[in-house]
Image (tube, rainbow, N blue to C red):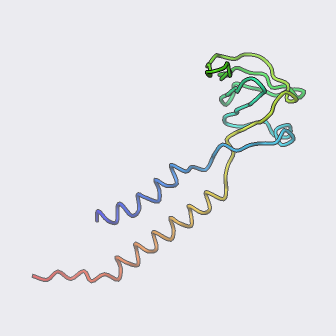
């Protein structure tokens, strides 16, 4: 029973740790079309700004919101709160959590394969007890 429990638990943990969402780089054009993401990281020339869901909005090619800034002040990086606006033209890179269907499908197939393997091994095993 312990082996069965572990063999079922491991695939579910893989799915949990890899998740359906992951941080992906988004082009500016894609961001202009759909700017509703769970978490947003914006990189400009001199700072990186992280926005949580609901703490930013986009109007007229400008990102408004409250977040955390990681400013690059040589030789260290300083965390500060940020509240203001950033022009999308000043942005070098945008990263956001997006749904990754490839990971979900691959892990789903893996989980089903392990479940079939466990069922086939336990159903073909000789369960007679000899004394």
Please give the count of numbered marks on the rendered protein.
0
Give the x, y percent position of residue 110: 53, 66
Looking at the rendered image, the quarter that the C terminus falls into is: bottom left
Residue at x 68%, y 22% (from the top left corner): 72
Residue at x 63%, y 21% (from the top left corner): 75
Above or below residue 16? Residue 35 is above
Give the x, y percent position of residue 88: 85, 29
Q: Dividing the picture into quarters, in which one does residue 57 lie? A: top right
Q: Dividing the picture into quarters, in which one does residue 98 lie? A: top right
Give the x, y percent position of residue 130: 13, 83
Looking at the rendered image, the quarter that the N terminus falls into is: bottom left
Above or below residue 35? Residue 63 is above
Judge from the rendering whether residue 119 lies leftward or rightward of residue 112; answer left or right: left
Which sits in the foreground, 73 or 12?
73
Instruction: Give the residue at the far front of this rendering.
Output: 75
Above or below residue 84? Residue 99 is below
Instruction: Give the residue at the far left of this rendering.
Output: 131
Residue at x 67%, y 28% (from the top left corner): 50
Q: Dividing the picture into quarters, in which one does residue 3 lie? A: bottom left
Judge from the rendering whether residue 30 lies leftward or rightward of residue 118; answer left or right: right
Give the x, y percent position of residue 81: 65, 16
């Amino acid at each position: 029973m312990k082996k069965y429990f572990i063999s079922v638990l491991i695939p579910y943990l893989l799915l949990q740790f890899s998740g359906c969402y992951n941080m992906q780089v988004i082009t500016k054009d894609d961001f202009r079309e759909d700017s509703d993401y769970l978490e947003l990281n914006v990189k400009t020339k001199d700072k990186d700004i992280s926005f949580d869901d609901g703490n930013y909005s986009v109007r007229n090619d400008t990102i408004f919101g409250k977040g955390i800034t990681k400013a690059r002040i040589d030789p260290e990086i300083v965390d500060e709160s940020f509240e203001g606006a950033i022009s999308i033209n000043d942005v070098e890179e945008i990263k956001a959590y997006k749904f990754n269907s490839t990971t979900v499908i691959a892990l789903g197939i893996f989980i089903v394969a392990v479940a079939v393997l466990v069922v086939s091994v336990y159903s073909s095993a000789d369960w007679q007890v000899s004394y």
